[in-house]
Image (cartoon, rainbow, N blue to C red):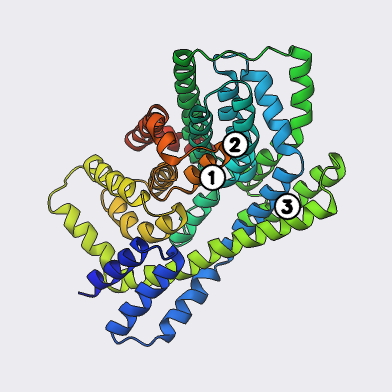
Amino acid sequence: MAIALLFLVFAILLVVGVPVAFALAAASLVTLLYLDLPSVVMVQQVSAGAGSASLIAIPLFIFAGEIMMRGGISERLIALASSLVGRMRGGLGQVSVLSSLFFGGVSGSAIADVSAVGGTMIPQMVKRGYDRDFAVNVSITAALVALLVPPSHNLILFSAAAGGGLSIARLFAAGIMPALLMTAALMVTGYVVARHRGYGVEPFPGWRAVLVRLVSALPGLGLVALIFVGIRAGIFTAVESAAIAVVYALLVTAVLYRELKFRVFLETVTHAARSTGVILFVIATAAVFGWLLAYLQVPAAAVEFLQSFAHSKYMVLLMIIVMLLLLGTFMDLAPMILICTPIFLPVAKAYGIDPIHFGLVLVLTGGIGLVTPPVGSVLFIGTAIGKITIAQSMRTIWPFWLAGLAVLLVVAFFPQLSLWLPDLLA
């Protein structure tokens, strides 16, 4: 009865439009009172949830990404991508996808990616004669790449939700090949759609211009190498790398590029603080929810339920993906990771699924939910930038959505695709 009450109150509050963090807190409090447990448990778990030292990396990476985005890095990355793939069919669409790969390695956030890259590329594509729905759809699905490349906030969040025992360095390494596969799949899809609609190509600027743009963008791309190599080599921890990333971003944008003015810096601090507050509030309230799941033995019940009729790990993985896709239609990615990891990770382990591999599947599945209505934050931002309705986007997004789903299934059922690089670097 307590399990049903916990999920029922949470679901009802989400349906009536209560923000996720408040819904998590309210459902947890009602269940605690029903179980006649002291309400101080909620305070203790909120404090424990937001007090993990590993979570310090998230606000620091958010801050570094905001500095890079407002300090001239995104424009240079887009210029480099344009010189590399602009001459392909539907050139600006290809530029948007490749720019998202580059910028994802700076921001680690799909929302930041679609705001920075989409905010630049969508108006440019419309100005050059591309249909608004194409410009929006290619930009919002390309933002999914940012979920997989270092320094992905969501992979750090998964590590914390899993109890902190999973290596963030291995998670970062595991996301690289799926990110490249997603980039290739979306570029091929963009090419096919662009050819069907008769879009043109961008002129090739010449190899000298490519070299100049590469040199200009290298300081931004260097952040990715700094983070990944530093953590992988054991030079510094994820938290230390996040702090170094902030200092590095300040030096590049304020000293080297000289584009981060004091007024812009204050705006960056404000926006990063606001984003951090929202994320940490969700993490804190989800900690109570997760504690109740463990107290009520929900993970053990989920394992027992699935074992009663599913005997193949691939069947279990497929069922989990379907459930996560359904949850992703009305739940944002961060709370979904925090709620679903304690439930489904024990199931995955019971069937011999590698936790690192499962983390990639969970994050990528939840990412597809970000571009799926009714609750898709990346979808909302992209359509707002492109000035079209969600219905207009949904009518033609299906080729890109299916490409993302295909990559998800390949990653899910061919685990070595994501695991071989972490094993190679071990």
Residue 381: mark: 1
The correct choice, above or below, for 190 with respect to 404 in the image is above
Residue 177's spot in the image, x, y percent? 49, 32
Secondary structure at numbered mark 3: helix
Identify the residue at horizontal 77%, vertical 52% (top origin): 247
Is the Cβ of the residue at disc 2 closer than 8 Å to that at disc 1? yes
Q: CA distance from mark 3 to mark 1?
A: 25 Å
3 or 1: mark nearer the eye: 1
**Would you say 311 lies left or right of 412 here?**
left
What residue type is disc 3 on? Val
Identify the residue at horizontal 13%, vertical 54% (top origin): 308
Q: Which residue is mark 2?
A: 118
Q: CA distance from mark 2 to mark 1?
A: 9 Å
Q: Which residue is mark 3?
A: 246
The correct choice, above or below, for 410 with respect to 379 in the image is above
Q: Nearer the viewer, residue 132 or 5?
A: 132
Which residue lies most toward the left here?
A: 309
Q: CA distance from mark 2 to mark 3?
A: 23 Å
Quadrant for the N terminus, please. Answer: bottom left
Give the crowd class for mark 1: few <14, some 14-19, many >=20 residues within 10 Å: many
What residue type is disc 1 on? Ile
Residue 130's spot in the image, x, y percent? 55, 22
Earlier residue among tags 2 and 1: 2
Earlier residue among tags 2 and 3: 2
Give the crowd class for mark 3: few <14, some 14-19, many >=20 residues within 10 Å: many
Identify the residue at horizontal 63%, vertical 33% (top origin): 102
Is the Cβ of the residue at disc 3 closer than 8 Å to that at disc 1? no
